[in-house]
């Protein structure tokens, strides 16, 4: 018997009891016991003897079998004490003729857990079922997996090691010098590979430089080194290098080499059976939760009828980027049924990124495959916000999915997915219009003839529309992070939208990935807007948000278009709806970060022109330029990753792709850029319509959004900076509660919270006045008071500076009035987007006289600042920006206040001269500037480059002075289309702010562009005339009056427009 196992297999307790109780003979003539106690004692001895003999017999056959058939790697990685536990369990089962099926859970010395599943044989799907049964620990992570099958195929033993999350790196410590020997051996071999004296297939010598290998070793656990032979280690290192620093998946598949196995395992005589049907699959998965990575890779093995003979999982540190999971599987195919390995490799790369619902659909319908399953689940997601408007009950999120994927409808859904696959197949190229019409007609006829249920017919026909209106997709990119579709916006809009004159966007991108869906909507070719993350807390809320997902994105994008009137970029927005229901905060954050990466990288798939995208079938066939910015729940790490990724993907001027970069951007919260503009509108509104000089007359303010928020926190700071002796902030609310004090909340305490980025529930209640109150949301009453603060508290001005869209709508706006019908604030300046619905705004003005400065005017400074960041990225080097950042930021703030001031002055001038509500004039100003911009853009397309060059001073004047001084000589770094957009927007806004809305509105479109181009020449003439007046001999008062007349009406008079 093996000397290590036998002592522990025998029952020491039983031996001690036998030795302690020697036999006593009652009679020299007979040893047969007569007393009951003696009978019991002798029986016990006999049974113990039989059990020992039986166990010894079982061990004598089990141990040699175990040593001969278990792979050598098992003995390298499994501690002796654990091996003993395994053998004891196996021997006991064999001794009783029971099936070799047992689960063992062991505590480890470091506080971790070892879970072992022993089963009589391996079969496809066994590993997947075990992985799904694994416990999910809050404080522990899966760090190692070892899957073993005996060479005779009669038993598999699968071990899963969970380590405490605060001790994951301790596996890299060397306790006895063994690690040093392992490292030295690897370094010796890698040096030979690097020098070319040893060649391994799949190992790049460039990755085997001593410094590179040493760096890699620092991230490897000792158990991983102990379980690796040199070639496998170096091959996995090369896979690691392929994904390090990113989010990708690298896969290598090679046939099992029995000769290599024998050389690495010389002590074992028996090799795995059926080696001719076995393959090694090596994968490196960047930043995936190991337990889930193992699950979705095991699922692919099951779907391809592959038995898993060996598996080893290890995690290697990847520095600031996170970690890389290395998974190595030895799989066995059924005789004569090898899978398509190329397709298998592609599908394995997709597993990290596909949605759980897609995975379930693949399992239930094994013939679908990854692509078709993903197309079907993506289409179901697109249909929800479209069909919800038709019938929100019949076409709920769940009903749409269950209808499309029902057994009777999935064959047709699969055929529709086939059409999508064929339409964008690079091997066959573009379909003609006739070919597409024929396919669509055939599919619609199939639906009508095969489906009875009218709701199903509607949904399946709408699925065909999704394919029809998709113009570009990343479906065929092997390394994509989600399924991205560039959609014709007509798909998302109904006839009712057209009847209501709802403007159709320029473009829509939809992305469907693991636990998220995302829309990007833009209203012009060149556009920018923020990315916001929406993470509902319940399944019901998730379904609700799914139904209004597109409309929310559309509304935010349209609002952005209205406020982007002063800059070259049109309005856009992306909203990423993420399923984090039931997750811990750490897991929620993990999924959010993954969703940002997948969404932004898929957008890059659709807009970059690189070798990997050049074969993409494209029915839009135009280059597209768009820029992103941060919005709700996007963090600095996201911003940095997106910029770095854009650079790696080959996007021109990648630093311009995402604004608010921590170092090379102008952080909105740090510099309060949005709030600077909001406060200008507050100031002008108080003076023009409230007849309050805020610098001398006391006034009160209430805000939604807390001291730790961007817009609200900075507005608090600016109010106290600009009006230290007159302003009182009487009400605030945020996610933690609400603060109210009619005598004014303590200034120093609010600024303390702002400077420390603390929420309102951290307010020192000792600094509240006699009538002041802090309501926290830890009680139902506190939630009620927080949610009603904006309605109840009376103030001269209400500034919504935080909160969800549509907080005030047509059904609840009267709650803003007191019992006498008097509004709690007569003036509202919208610092937050879409806080009040358009219908509610109109009713609040018409029925209660409330004056509302619309969001597209009030908070536009933020988007102007982000646009200047894009310009800086194009015109300045990193060193120039950083060296001059303080001056550049100061100049940007001057520009922001200027743009806010000229619009505010025009807004209230139009309001005082013509009938209508303030939001009407705000929209009218935006529409007028955008209309003029479009007209000028059309005219610019007709001009040559020399004529365009003459207009470039408009762009220079638009820039902050320091930026123009330092970098305008690099203006050719700007894309040509961006230059044209900059000229058009600069000229259009100049004309409207100077001459008023009616000057432009009165001109027919065909004349507008011509007049705009003449405006530049006449403006220069008027500037010359003003100079002549200044140099005349007239008295000063007369000179100033004449100069003012020339400035106000000279251009208009010269153009003969009244």
Image (tube, grey):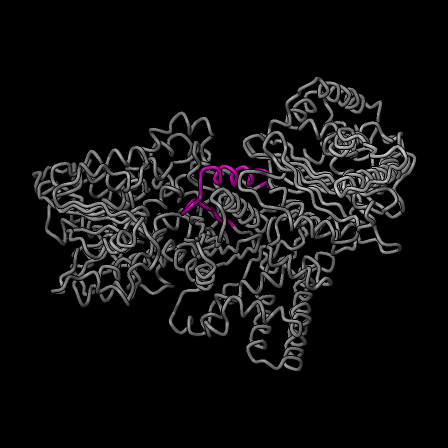
Q: Residue 491 appears at what percent x and percent y?
A: 52, 67
Vertical arrangement, residue 1052 with respect to residue 877, above or below: below
Vertical arrangement, residue 427 with respect to residue 409, above or below: above
Left or right, residue 1035 beside residue 608: left
Left or right, residue 326 beside residue 518: right
Q: Residue at x 69, y 42 (%)?
A: 104
Q: Residue at x 36, y 56 (%)?
A: 559
Q: Quadrant of the C terminus?
A: bottom left
Picture quadrant of residue 868:
top left
Q: Residue 944 appears at what percent x and percent y?
A: 48, 49
Q: Quadrant of the N terminus?
A: top right
Q: How many marks?
A: 0
Q: Residue 557 appears at what percent x and percent y?
A: 41, 56
Q: Residue at x 44, y 44 (%)?
A: 634
Whether residue 234 is visible, yes or no, is no
Vertical arrangement, residue 658 with respect to residue 1007, above or below: above
| Region of the chain picked out in magenta, as a range | 625-650
Picture quadrant of residue 415:
bottom right
Q: Residue 950 appears at what percent x and percent y?
A: 41, 43
Foreground of the two, 110 or 380:
110
Whether residue 834 is visible, yes or no, is yes
Foreground of the two, 567 or 263:
263
């Amino acid at each position: 018997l093996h000397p290590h196992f036998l002592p522990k297999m025998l029952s020491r307790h039983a031996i001690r009891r036998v030795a302690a109780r020697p036999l006593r003979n009652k009679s020299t003539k007979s040893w047969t016991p007569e007393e009951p106690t003696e009978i019991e004692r002798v029986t016990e001895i006999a049974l113990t003897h039989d059990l020992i003999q039986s166990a010894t017999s079982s061990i004598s056959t089990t141990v040699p079998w175990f040593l001969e058939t278990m792979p050598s790697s098992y003995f390298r990685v499994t501690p002796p004490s654990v091996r003993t536990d395994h053998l004891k369990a196996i021997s006991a089962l064999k001794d009783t003729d029971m099936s070799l099926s047992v689960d063992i859970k062991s505590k480890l010395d470091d506080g971790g857990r070892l879970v072992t599943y022993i089963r009589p044989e391996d079969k496809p799907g066994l590993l997947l079922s075990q992985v799904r049964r694994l416990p999910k620990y809050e404080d522990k992570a899966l760090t190692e997996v070892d899957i073993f099958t005996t060479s005779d195929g009669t038993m598999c033993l699968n071990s899963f090691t969970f380590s405490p999350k605060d001790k994951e790196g301790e596996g890299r410590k060397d306790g006895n010098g063994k690690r040093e020997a392992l490292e030295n051996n690897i370094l010796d071999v890698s040096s030979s590979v690097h020098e070319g004296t040893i060649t391994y297939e799949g190992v790049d010598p460039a990755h085997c430089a001593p410094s590179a290998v040493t760096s890699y070793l620092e991230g490897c656990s000792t158990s991983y080194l102990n379980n690796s032979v040199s070639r496998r280690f170096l091959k996995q290192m090369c896979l690691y290098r392929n994904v390090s620093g990113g989010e990708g998946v690298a896969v290598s598949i090679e046939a099992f080499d029995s000769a290599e196995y024998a050389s690495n395992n010389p002590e074992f005589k028996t090799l795995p059976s059926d080696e001719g049907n076995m393959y090694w699959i090596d994968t490196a998965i960047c930043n995936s939760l190991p337990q889930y990575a193992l699950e979705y890779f095991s699922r692919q093995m099951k779907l391809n009828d592959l038995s898993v003979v060996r598996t080893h999982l290890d995690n290697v540190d990847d520095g600031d980027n996170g970690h890389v999971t290395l998974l190595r599987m030895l799989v066995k195919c059924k005789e004569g049924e090898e899978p398509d390995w190329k397709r298998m490799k592609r599908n394995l790369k997709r597993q990290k990124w596909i949605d759980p619902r897609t995975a379930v659909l693949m399992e239930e319908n094994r013939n679908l495959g990854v692509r078709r399953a993903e197309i079907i689940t993506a289409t179901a997601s697109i249909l929800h916000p479209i069909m919800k408007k038709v019938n929100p009950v019949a076409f709920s999120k769940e009903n749409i999915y269950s209808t499309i994927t029902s057994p009777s409808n999935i064959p047709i859904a699969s055929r529709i997915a086939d059409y999508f696959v064929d339409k964008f197949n690079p091997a066959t190229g573009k379909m003609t219009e006739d070919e597409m019409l024929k396919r669509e007609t055939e599919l619609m006829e199939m639906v009508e003839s095969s489906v009875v249920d009218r709701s199903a017919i509607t949904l399946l026909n709408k699925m065909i529309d999704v394919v029809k209106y998709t113009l570009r997709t990343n479906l065929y990119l092997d390394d994509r992070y989600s399924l991205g579709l560039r959609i014709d916006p007509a798909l998302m809009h109904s006839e009712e939208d057209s009847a209501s004159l709802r403007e159709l966007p320029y473009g829509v991108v939809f992305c469907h990935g693991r636990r998220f869906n995302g829309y990007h909507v833009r209203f012009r070719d060149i556009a920018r807007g923020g990315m916001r993350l929406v993470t509902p807390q319940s399944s019901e809320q998730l379904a609700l948000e799914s139904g209004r997902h597109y409309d929310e994105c559309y509304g935010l994008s349209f609002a952005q278009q209205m406020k982007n009137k002063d800059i070259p970029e049109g309005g856009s927005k992306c909203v990423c709806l993420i399923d984090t229901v039931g997750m811990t905060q750490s897991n929620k954050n993990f999924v959010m970060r993954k969703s940002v990466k997948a969404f932004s990288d898929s957008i890059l798939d659709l807009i970059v022109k690189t070798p990997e995208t050049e074969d993409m079938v494209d029915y839009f066939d135009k280059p597209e330029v768009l820029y992103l910015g941060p919005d709700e729940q996007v963090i600095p790490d996201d911003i940095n990753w997106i910029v770095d990724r854009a650079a790696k993907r080959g996007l021109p001027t990648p630093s311009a792709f995402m604004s608010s970069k921590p170092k090379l951007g102008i952080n909105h919260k740090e510099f309060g850029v949005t709030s600077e503009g909001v406060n200008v509108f507050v100031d002008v509104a108080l003076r023009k319509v409230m007849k309050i000089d805020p610098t001398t007359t006391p006034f009160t303010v209430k805000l939604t959004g807390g001291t730790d928020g961007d817009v609200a926190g900075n507005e608090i700071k600016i109010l106290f900076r600009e009006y230290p002796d007159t302003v009182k902030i009487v009400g605030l609310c945020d996610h933690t509660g609400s603060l109210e004090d009619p005598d004014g909340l303590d200034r120093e305490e609010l600024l303390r919270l702002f400077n420390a980025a603390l929420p309102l529930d951290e307010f020192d209640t000792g600094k509240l006045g006699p009538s002041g109150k802090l309501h926290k949301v830890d009680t139902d009453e506190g939630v009620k008071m927080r949610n009603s603060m904006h309605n109840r508290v009376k103030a001269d001005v209400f500034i919504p500076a935080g909160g969800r869209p549509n907080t005030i709508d047509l059904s609840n706006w009267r709650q803003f009035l007191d019992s006498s019908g008097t509004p709690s604030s007569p003036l509202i300046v919208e610092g937050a987007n879409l806080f009040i619905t358009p219908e509610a705004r109109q009713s609040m003005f018409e029925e209660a006289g409330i004056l509302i400065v619309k969001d597209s005017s009030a908070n536009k400074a933020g988007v102007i600042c982000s646009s200047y960041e894009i310009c800086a990225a194009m015109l300045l080097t990193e060193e120039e920006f950083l060296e001059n950042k303080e001056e550049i930021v100061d100049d940007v703030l001057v520009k922001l206040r200027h743009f806010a001031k000229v619009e505010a002055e025009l807004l209230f001038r139009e309001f005082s001269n013509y009938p209508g509500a303030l939001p009407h004039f705000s929209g009218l100003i935006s529409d007028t500037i955008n209309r003029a911009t479009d007209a000028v853009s059309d005219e610019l397309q007709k001009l040559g480059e020399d004529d365009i060059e003459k207009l470039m001073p408009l762009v220079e004047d638009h820039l902050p002075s320091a930026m123009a001084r330092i970098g305008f000589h690099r203006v050719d770094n700007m894309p040509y289309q961006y230059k044209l957009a900059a000229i058009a927007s600069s000229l259009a806004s100049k004309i409207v702010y100077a001459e008023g809305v009616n000057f432009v509105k009165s001109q027919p479109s065909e004349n507008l562009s011509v007049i705009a181009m003449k405006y530049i020449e006449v403006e220069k003439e008027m500037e010359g005339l003003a100079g002549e007046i200044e140099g005349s001999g007239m008295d000063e008062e007369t000179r100033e009056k004449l100069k003012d007349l020339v400035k106000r009406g000279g251009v208009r008079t010269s153009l003969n427009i009244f």
